[in-house]
Amino acid sequence: MRLISILILLIVSVQSGRAQWQADFYFNQAYESNPFRLPENEPSWISTLDMGLQYNFGDFAVSYRGDYTYFTNFLDRNHYWHQAAFFGEIGPTNMGLYYTQRFNKNDFTIYNYYTGVAYLNHSAELAGFNVFISGNAILTRYAELADLDNIEMNGLLRINKGFETRTTFISGLGIYYKDYTQSYTIIDTVANSSSGQMGEGMGSGSGSTGYYYTELEAPSVSQWQAWIRVAQSIFERTGLSAQYQVRKSLTGSARFVSGPTLGYNEESEIFDDPLGYELQSFGSELTSILPGQVILKASYYQGQKDYITQGIYLSEDIYDEKVLRHDRYNTVAVNLRKVFPAGSVNYEIRFWYQWYRNTSNSYWYNYQNHYSSISLGINF
């Protein structure tokens, strides 16, 4: 909250003649067959109201964004998320600070957290290549999961090259390091509630056996990531791309709360930390500008994840820490977007569909989900 106060003070004190306001509002109505990624589907309609306010002064800006998510069938899962930011650019370099916080209802305060991010990006042209360098530091703290509190530092190098054949080559290398602020963890049971956070799933379950910590000695974990992407313009207004990505562990062991994937959106970080597994994935995307300036994007991705620490569930409540979890996933997504400009105001409509299928040697992580949504927005 202190950062929010500072941002408000900046807004009031800035006297730049070039200062201006920007705002946007979006309403998203979605239906998910399995929003909490459980072996047995528990569908729900999900409504999200999102708003953003930004004040620009010169090459810098301050902003505030918040959204409220409402689950028709799981009212105790409704939550509010907000973010305050200060960011700007100086020539080819841009930088910023973000503060993010999430508020949940009483039965799910386990998901309350706050995150502070500082980042610095620089772009340049070198020997005909476009070079992008990025670094950031992230502090994350959880209200009830102190053993997962961490500081993360990441570095990224990306290189782009375009050719006369209308082909673009993109490759990148990233290094990720996470240090857990707690020097040790213990085996414990937390976050039981009458709504049943295990067994039958969120909201309508008949009981809870809890979340189990795994005892680890390593206080940090690091990984490297590399990817290659090739994009080709196949028609005047249509492009096709293919991408391969790999993540490998360097040192350490990730910490986690083993249990069912009750995550929704960013909640999944607790159960599916990207630094907690090694990854290989392949995918393809099609982008086309249709008549009426409608933008179509369609994609397919598949991959496999090998967890470096997490064991498996043999059944609903029998956990085996001697066998490591292994997942495979497939996903298909289609997105349609249309913007209606009206002077200084833009109206926007989006349609989104995604199918996701995950198969695992761990009971709680065998699931699939169908997601469909329509989004209406205005920005000015």
Image: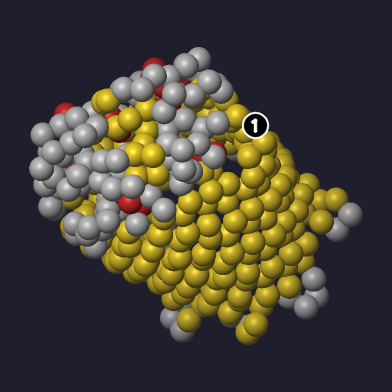
Residue at image position (69%, 59%) is: 228
Q: Residue furthest top?
A: 183
Badge 1 element: strand
* Residue 374 x, y percent position in the rendering: 29, 65
Report the number of numbered marks: 1
Residue at image position (41%, 53%) is: 361
Left or right relative to 194: residue 307: right
* Residue 294 x, y percent position in the rendering: 44, 76
Q: Residue furthest right?
A: 127
Q: Residues within 10 Å of mark 1 (few under 14, many from 20)?
A: few
For residue 1, say whether it is visible: yes
Left or right relative to 204: residue 232: right
* Residue 196 x, y percent position in the rendering: 15, 39
Query: Closer to the camera, 293 or 135?
Result: 135
Left or right relative to 251: residue 368: left
Colouring used for the render: secondary structure
User: Quadrant of the rendered structure where residue 40 is?
Assistant: bottom left
User: Disc 1 residue type?
Assistant: Thr
Q: Is residue 266 positioned above or below 286 on the image?
A: above
For residue 137, say whether it is visible: no
Q: Which residue is label 1 attached to?
A: 251
User: Quadrant of the rendered structure where residue 4 is?
Assistant: top left
Quadrant for the N terminus, please: top left
Q: Is residue 257 positioned above or below 231 on the image?
A: above
User: Quadrant of the rendered structure where residue 59 is?
Assistant: top right
Query: Closer to the camera, 312 or 103?
Result: 312
Residue at image position (82%, 56%) is: 129
Q: Is residue 374 positioned above or below 24 on the image?
A: below
Residue at image position (46%, 38%) is: 322
Query: Closer to the camera, 41 or 8?
Result: 41
* Residue 349 x, y percent position in the rendering: 34, 66
